[in-house]
Image (cartoon, grey):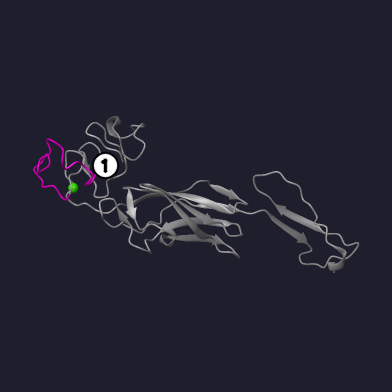
Amino acid sequence: MANTPDTVSVLGDITAATGPYGHVQGDEQFMVLDYRLDGSSPCVNVGDDAAEYLRDTDIEGRPRIGAADIGAYECQAPAGAIVRSITPQSDLVTNAETIVFEVVFSRALESGLGVEDFIINFLGLSKIQPTVVEVTGSDYRWFVTVHTGDENGWLTLDLVDAGDLITDIIGLGLDAPFSDGDGVIIDFLEIVTHPVGATKEPGDSHMFTVVAQNGIGALHYPEVPREIQG
Ligand SMILES: [Ca+2]
């Protein structure tokens, strides 16, 4: 967050003024109309202590807690950052090896976030369980790459803070866990032969059921070398 005496950067979409009387509304972290900060707000402890007219107390005479907060009111109960959202980058994934989730925090992180901090919930019959393979990103926005396994199902991602303690830029621990993220449907192309598992003999006929999603393709019968035919 790049803040100067003249500008304040606030996470979120403030172009759509949908709150009461056309004011900005951003969850519970920035209680617009009285400008008091929630403990997990990005404005806590990131004000400028060297500002020329900074007072020892806020506009109500309440003491500073740690570094000064941005705004007129000093948050009296600073708390760690929270997860604002965990969102897959697609609602439906067809035949893809990986899917990426975006994870947004209420405050920039300092350290401690890794693949061990995430748990996958998968509803489906998977021979290869989906796994978290990579965590990238910085500050508020992080991206988690998940290997999709090999079967159709419904996949969500939770954050549990299982490895090194996740800390934010003001040194507080993350308020984990988070398990309210959006899910993604994993679809794989499926081909079933009929009769199932039958030995193929010269002259036999076979039928195929093809479950295809979101695409156009052709079905090919692979040519099997003579020496390994049953
Ligand atoms: Ca403070």
Amino acid type of the residue tagged 1 in the rendering? Phe
What residue is rendered at 10% in x and 46% in y? Answer: 62
Q: Nearer the viewer, residue 127 or 1?
A: 1
Q: Is residue 203 left or right of residue 157?
A: right
Which secondary structure is most common in the magenta stretch? loop
- Location of the N terminus by quadrant is top left
Q: Position of residue 10 (x, y in %)?
A: 30, 38
What residue is rendered at 40% in x and 57% in y? Answer: 179
Q: Nearer the viewer, residue 144 or 204?
A: 144
Tell me the residue that label 1 is attached to.
Answer: 30
The furthest residue to the front: 50
Q: Position of residue 226 (x, y in %)?
A: 87, 64
Q: How many discs appear?
A: 1
Q: Verify whether residue 54 appears in magenta.
A: yes
Q: Position of residue 181 (x, y in %)?
A: 43, 52
Q: Position of residue 223 (x, y in %)?
A: 83, 57
Q: Verify whether residue 15 appears in magenta.
A: no
Q: Is residue 98 left or right of residue 77?
A: right
The magenta stretch is 43-66
Q: Nearer the viewer, residue 66 or 11?
A: 66
- Location of the C terminus by quadrant is bottom right
In the structure shown, which secondary structural element does the residue marked by tag 1 occupy? strand
Dot 1, crowdedness within 10 Å: few (<14), some or many (≥20)? many
